[in-house]
Every structure is written in C-alpha cells, then in structure tokens.
Amino acid sequence: MEAVVQTRGLTKDYGSVLALDALDLEIGAGTTGLVGANGAGKSTLLKILLGLVPATRGGARVLGHEIATEGPAIRAAVGYLPEHDCLPPDVSASDFVVHMAMMSGLPRVAARERAAEVLRHVGLAEERYRPMGGYSTGMKQKAKLAQALAHDPRLVLLDEPTNGLDPAARDEMLGLVQRIGRDFGIAVIVTSHLLGELERVSDHVVVLDGGRLLRASSTDEFLDATGVLLVEVLGDDAQARMAQALNRSGVATVARGTMLTVDATARASDQVDVHDLIRDTASDLGLGLVRLQVDHRHIEDVFATDGAAASSPEVSHD
Ligand SMILES: Nc1ncnc2c1ncn2[C@@H]1O[C@H](COP(=O)(O)OP(=O)(O)OP(=O)(O)O)[C@@H](O)[C@H]1O
Ligand SMILES: [Mg+2]
C-alpha cells in the first residue's frame, strides 16, 4: 500500500531558523502521532504537506500528490485542523461547516447534510446555530474538527486538537480522534507536545526534534523498545548493595522507589546476559530476588528516563 505521506530531504528555512532539517519520513495508513517540543517543526511540516507553505529544499508526496505542484488535489483530499483559532466569531458552526464543505466542492444540499452529520459526530448538535464567538475553547476545537471532516477527506492533519482543553474535554477530543481513524478508516496525523496522550490514540509515533526525525515506530514497538527491566531485591541494604555489584560488573542502574531499573539490552563487562547477571548477583549477595520483569511504561517516561540515563548512569530519584 502506498504511503500516505512521504518526504524526501524536506527542509524549511525561515531565514535564521531551520524549522525542518532534511527530513526523510514515511507515514502509512492509520493514526500517527507527531510529537515534539515547542518549535520542533510540527506545524511547519503540516502546512508544507498541505501546500500552504513552500519548502526551501526537498519534497514530499501526500496521498500520491506532489506538494510543489498538486496543492489543490491535496487539499481536496485532506482535512486540516489548524493550531490557532481560525473561526469567524459572528458565524455559527453550522453555517461555517456548510461553507467549508461547499468550498471543497459539495453542492449546497449535500453540504448541509454533511455538516449536520459531522457536527453531531463531534458533539456540537445543540449549539451549532450559535455564533462561534461565544464558544468555549472545547467547543471551538470541536468546530475546527468538524470543518476538517466536512468534505469526507481521506487524510486529516490535526494540529494540537487538545490544546487549551481541560482533562475531561481532552479525553473527549482524544476519543473523537480515535474514532476518526478506527470507525471511518480515515488516515490521521495528530500533533501534540504531550507524548502520553498520543500513545492512547496512535498506531504509530513520529518524534521530531529541532526539525529532525528523532524516532519513528509503531506505538507498540515504541513501548517495547524501552527495554527496561525492573529489579527488586530483599535483604539488608539490598537496593544499594545490588546496585553497587551490578555497576561493578559494568551494568548501570537507576533507582526507582525501592526498585532498580536496568537496561535490558545491557551486557556485563564479561558479556554475560543481563538477566543471568541479575540472578547470579542477587544469589551471590544472599539477597532475595522478588522481581525481575520487563517494565511497561508510558512514552512520556521513556523520554524522561532516556535523558537522565544519558547524562548520568547512576541517578538516584530520592
Ligand atoms: N512564519 C515563520 N517565520 C519565522 N519562523 C517561523 C515561522 N513559523 C515557524 N517558525 C519557526 O520555526 C520553528 C518551528 O516552528 P513550528 O511552529 O513548526 O513548531 P511546532 O513544533 O509546531 O511548535 P509548537 O509546539 O510550539 O506549536 C520554530 O523555531 C519557529 O519559531
Ligand atoms: Mg505547532
């Protein structure tokens, strides 16, 4: 199956700022979470993919269309929820979505039907005739989502749809995002700077950092790839003695509460497998090994721990 998005050396230079740095990326069907800190280049990438902003160098194809030359064909097949407020305050959500659907080529009657449908889908049935200027942030985000879906796109690009939402509204929005992919089979690219919230809704995760690709993998691999072992030992001063012994064997440890975490792919100085080393070390020290298991944590923690481990291998959290 053809990639939904494919970029080749995609570069965007805003004068002194290099927003995208020779990005090579392939995104397939399903829901992809595009994660990165503020300024990582997420919004720039989406705008370039829509053909709204020209690339400085390199290129990309979206649903098989070249961004440089086929912008209209791309925008006909792609829905977009922009990051910033873009809603005319004096217009009702209903009129707005009908208008957007007609702009995309639907006849008036079909546009009305479609608008009613998508507004019901996002949960704006009651309020849809009120001017959007009076909407809460949550309602505005829903109206933005509705217009992105109005013309029955094959792909939607959602730029921080949870931005500014309280926890309940955030959950609701994430549920809607999930349903776009799962129930309607529309490909979704959704951005956030919160890694944890995308883990729930995304089949794939792409991490951008300073305009470059830091990582791209399925969400499952992403979690498995953490490859962290949790170790718990019982006995006098067990945690510290275990940590010292493992460190002497060339394996770094990180304290987490009463447990230790160890990189599952680590090898002792003498090439012994880390699982065997942990068992043998506990036994040599006369400590009870009560836990040796793979740690299934959340994407957010992966980053927090990666950073800490990189800067100093023996971090104590207390
Ligand atoms: N129109 C512009 N002119 C100049 N610099 C820009 C422009 N748009 C973006 N930038 C810069 O490009 C970089 C990437 O910005 P971008 O908005 O794509 O990041 P982002 O990942 O969407 O960040 P955020 O999470 O804050 O939305 C930033 O350093 C930003 O300041
Ligand atoms: Mg942005």
Image (cartoon, helix red, strand yellow):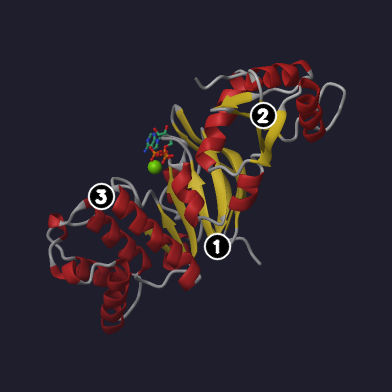
Return the mark for residue 85: 3
Which one is in front in this view, the residue at disc 3 or the one at disc 1?
A: 1
Which one is in front in this view, the residue at disc 3 or the one at disc 2?
A: 2
Percent position of residue 86, x then y: 25, 53
Lower sequence index among marks 3 and 1: 1
Percent position of residue 170, x then y: 34, 52
Q: Residue at position x 48%, y 39% from top? A: 36
Q: In this orientation, does residue 11 appear?
A: no
The Cα–Cα distance between marks 1 and 2, rounded to whole angstroms, is 42 Å
Query: Which type of secondary structure does the marked residue at label 3 adopt?
Result: loop
Asked if the residues shown at circle 3 and circle 1 are in contact, with their CB atoms under 8 angstroms apart, the answer is no
Asked if the residues shown at circle 1 and circle 2 are in contact, with their CB atoms under 8 angstroms apart, the answer is no
Label 3 sits on what residue type? Asp
Lower sequence index among marks 1 and 2: 1
What crowding class fits label 1: few (fewer than 14 Cα within 10 Å), some (14-19), or many (20 or more)? some
Asked if the residues shown at circle 3 and circle 2 are in contact, with their CB atoms under 8 angstroms apart, the answer is no
Answer left or right for 85 relative to 10: left
Answer left or right for 48 relative to 264: left
Which one is in front, 307 or 62? 307
Return the mark for residue 30: 1
Q: Which residue is mark 2?
A: 233
Q: Residue at position x 21%, y 70% from top? A: 94
| Residue at mark 2: C-beta within 8 A of ligand 1 | no
Quadrant where the N terminus is found in the figure = bottom right
Residue 245 vertical placement versus 30 (above, below): above
Q: Quadrant of ligand 2?
A: top left
Answer left or right for 186 relative to 143: right
| Residue at mark 3: C-beta within 8 A of ligand 2 | no
What crowding class fits label 3: few (fewer than 14 Cα within 10 Å), some (14-19), or many (20 or more)? few
